[in-house]
Image (tube, rainbow, N blue to C red):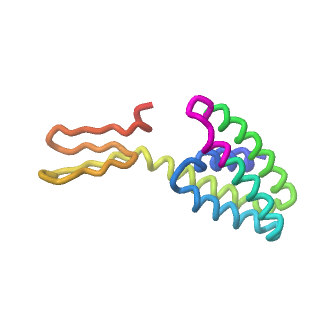
Amino acid sequence: MQAADLGAGALVAEMAKSTWESMRAAVARLFRRGGEESAAQELELIDAARQRLVDSSESERGSVEDRLRTELMIQLAAFLQKHPDAAQELQDLTDQVKGVGQRDGALASVHHNTGSQVVISGRDVNASGGFHYRSPEQSR
Protein backbone atom coordinates (compact mmCIF):
# COMPACT_ATOMS: atom_id res chain seq x y z
CA MET A 1 0.00 0.00 0.00
CA GLN A 2 2.88 2.36 0.74
CA ALA A 3 4.32 1.84 -2.76
CA ALA A 4 0.90 2.63 -4.26
CA ASP A 5 0.56 5.77 -2.15
CA LEU A 6 4.04 7.03 -3.02
CA GLY A 7 3.55 6.08 -6.67
CA ALA A 8 0.28 7.98 -6.86
CA GLY A 9 1.93 11.07 -5.40
CA ALA A 10 4.77 10.82 -7.93
CA LEU A 11 2.35 10.43 -10.83
CA VAL A 12 0.29 13.45 -9.84
CA ALA A 13 3.44 15.51 -9.32
CA GLU A 14 4.69 14.66 -12.83
CA MET A 15 1.38 15.06 -14.69
CA ALA A 16 1.67 18.81 -15.27
CA LYS A 17 5.41 18.81 -15.99
CA SER A 18 7.21 18.71 -19.31
CA THR A 19 8.67 15.35 -18.25
CA TRP A 20 5.24 13.69 -18.28
CA GLU A 21 5.82 11.64 -21.44
CA SER A 22 8.86 9.88 -19.97
CA MET A 23 6.92 9.19 -16.76
CA ARG A 24 3.98 7.87 -18.79
CA ALA A 25 6.32 5.54 -20.71
CA ALA A 26 7.74 4.18 -17.44
CA VAL A 27 4.24 3.60 -16.06
CA ALA A 28 3.25 1.88 -19.31
CA ARG A 29 6.18 -0.54 -18.88
CA LEU A 30 5.00 -1.23 -15.34
CA PHE A 31 1.42 -1.90 -16.44
CA ARG A 32 2.56 -4.24 -19.24
CA ARG A 33 3.26 -6.80 -16.54
CA GLY A 34 -0.48 -7.40 -16.70
CA GLY A 35 -0.52 -7.80 -20.48
CA GLU A 36 -1.03 -5.36 -23.34
CA GLU A 37 -4.82 -5.14 -23.03
CA SER A 38 -4.65 -4.53 -19.30
CA ALA A 39 -1.90 -1.94 -19.78
CA ALA A 40 -4.04 -0.07 -22.32
CA GLN A 41 -6.96 0.04 -19.86
CA GLU A 42 -4.76 1.21 -16.99
CA LEU A 43 -3.15 3.91 -19.15
CA GLU A 44 -6.56 5.10 -20.30
CA LEU A 45 -7.43 5.81 -16.66
CA ILE A 46 -4.07 7.55 -16.10
CA ASP A 47 -4.51 9.68 -19.23
CA ALA A 48 -8.03 10.69 -18.18
CA ALA A 49 -6.74 11.65 -14.73
CA ARG A 50 -3.97 13.77 -16.24
CA GLN A 51 -6.44 15.49 -18.55
CA ARG A 52 -8.64 16.43 -15.58
CA LEU A 53 -5.60 17.93 -13.86
CA VAL A 54 -4.45 19.86 -16.92
CA ASP A 55 -7.98 21.14 -17.56
CA SER A 56 -8.50 22.27 -13.97
CA SER A 57 -8.35 25.95 -13.10
CA GLU A 58 -5.57 27.27 -10.89
CA SER A 59 -8.05 27.76 -8.03
CA GLU A 60 -9.24 24.14 -8.10
CA ARG A 61 -5.86 22.53 -8.87
CA GLY A 62 -5.09 21.56 -5.25
CA SER A 63 -8.37 19.74 -4.70
CA VAL A 64 -8.09 18.01 -8.10
CA GLU A 65 -4.57 16.84 -7.19
CA ASP A 66 -5.84 15.45 -3.88
CA ARG A 67 -8.67 13.53 -5.58
CA LEU A 68 -6.33 12.19 -8.24
CA ARG A 69 -3.80 11.07 -5.63
CA THR A 70 -6.53 9.02 -3.94
CA GLU A 71 -7.85 7.57 -7.21
CA LEU A 72 -4.38 6.66 -8.46
CA MET A 73 -3.42 5.13 -5.13
CA ILE A 74 -6.45 2.83 -5.37
CA GLN A 75 -5.62 1.99 -9.01
CA LEU A 76 -1.98 1.23 -8.22
CA ALA A 77 -2.84 -0.76 -5.08
CA ALA A 78 -5.26 -2.92 -7.10
CA PHE A 79 -2.61 -3.43 -9.79
CA LEU A 80 0.03 -4.36 -7.21
CA GLN A 81 -2.36 -6.80 -5.57
CA LYS A 82 -2.59 -8.65 -8.91
CA HIS A 83 1.13 -8.17 -9.68
CA PRO A 84 3.08 -7.95 -6.41
CA ASP A 85 6.34 -8.43 -8.32
CA ALA A 86 5.85 -4.93 -9.76
CA ALA A 87 6.10 -3.24 -6.34
CA GLN A 88 9.88 -2.81 -6.53
CA GLU A 89 9.66 -1.32 -10.03
CA LEU A 90 7.06 1.18 -8.80
CA GLN A 91 9.23 1.99 -5.78
CA ASP A 92 12.24 2.56 -8.06
CA LEU A 93 10.17 4.86 -10.28
CA THR A 94 9.00 6.81 -7.23
CA ASP A 95 12.57 7.12 -5.95
CA GLN A 96 13.69 8.36 -9.35
CA VAL A 97 11.02 11.09 -9.34
CA LYS A 98 11.87 12.09 -5.78
CA GLY A 99 15.55 12.33 -6.71
CA VAL A 100 14.75 14.68 -9.59
CA GLY A 101 12.68 16.84 -7.26
CA GLN A 102 15.51 17.09 -4.77
CA ARG A 103 17.91 18.31 -7.44
CA ASP A 104 15.46 21.09 -8.38
CA GLY A 105 16.64 23.02 -5.35
CA ALA A 106 20.26 23.12 -6.51
CA LEU A 107 21.90 26.50 -6.79
CA ALA A 108 23.22 27.47 -10.22
CA SER A 109 25.83 30.21 -10.22
CA VAL A 110 26.93 32.25 -13.22
CA HIS A 111 30.31 34.04 -13.12
CA HIS A 112 32.08 36.40 -15.55
CA ASN A 113 29.00 36.61 -17.72
CA THR A 114 29.38 40.13 -19.11
CA GLY A 115 27.48 40.94 -22.31
CA SER A 116 25.60 37.64 -22.63
CA GLN A 117 22.28 36.18 -21.59
CA VAL A 118 21.40 34.09 -18.60
CA VAL A 119 18.71 31.51 -19.25
CA ILE A 120 16.77 30.76 -16.10
CA SER A 121 15.02 27.46 -15.79
CA GLY A 122 13.55 26.33 -12.52
CA ARG A 123 16.47 26.93 -10.18
CA ASP A 124 18.15 29.80 -8.40
CA VAL A 125 20.78 31.76 -10.29
CA ASN A 126 23.41 33.96 -8.73
CA ALA A 127 25.44 35.86 -11.30
CA SER A 128 28.38 37.71 -9.85
CA GLY A 129 27.98 41.45 -10.28
CA GLY A 130 24.75 41.79 -8.34
CA PHE A 131 22.19 39.74 -10.27
CA HIS A 132 20.34 37.23 -8.09
CA TYR A 133 17.29 35.28 -9.13
CA ARG A 134 15.27 32.97 -6.89
CA SER A 135 13.04 30.56 -8.77
CA PRO A 136 9.31 30.71 -7.92
CA GLU A 137 9.39 27.07 -6.79
CA GLN A 138 12.06 27.90 -4.22
CA SER A 139 10.26 31.01 -2.97
CA ARG A 140 7.33 29.07 -1.53
In which quadrant will I find the C terminus? top left
**Front in this rendered view, residue 24 or 95:** 24
Above-or-below relation of 30 to 47: below
Residue 105 lies left or right of residue 57; in this view the side is left
Identity of the residue furthest to the right in this view: 82
Residue 4 percent across, percent down from the top left: 74, 49
Q: Is residue 2 left or right of residue 60?
A: right
Residue in front for this viewpoint, 105 or 11: 11
Q: Which residues are magenta?
A: 51-61
Please state the horizontal and vertical placement of residue 58, each as a whole percent of the image: 56, 33
Q: Residue at x 70, y 47 (%)?
A: 49
Q: Position of residue 76 (x, y in %)?
A: 77, 51
Indicate whether residue 55 is drawn in magenta. yes
Number of marks: 0
Q: Residue furthest top?
A: 59
> Which residue lies at the image location 45% right of the left edge and 50% below the top edge?
103
List x then y, in percent, for residue 118.
25, 50
Question: Residue 96 is drawn in which quadrant?
Answer: bottom right
Q: Is residue 53 above or below residue 116?
A: above
Residue drawn at x 17%, y 54% as measured from the top left: 116
Residue drawn at 60 percent across, 53 percent down = 95
Residue 58 on the magenta span: yes
Horizontal side, residue 120 vs residue 2: left or right:
left
Look at the picture and state if 59 lies above or below 38. Answer: above
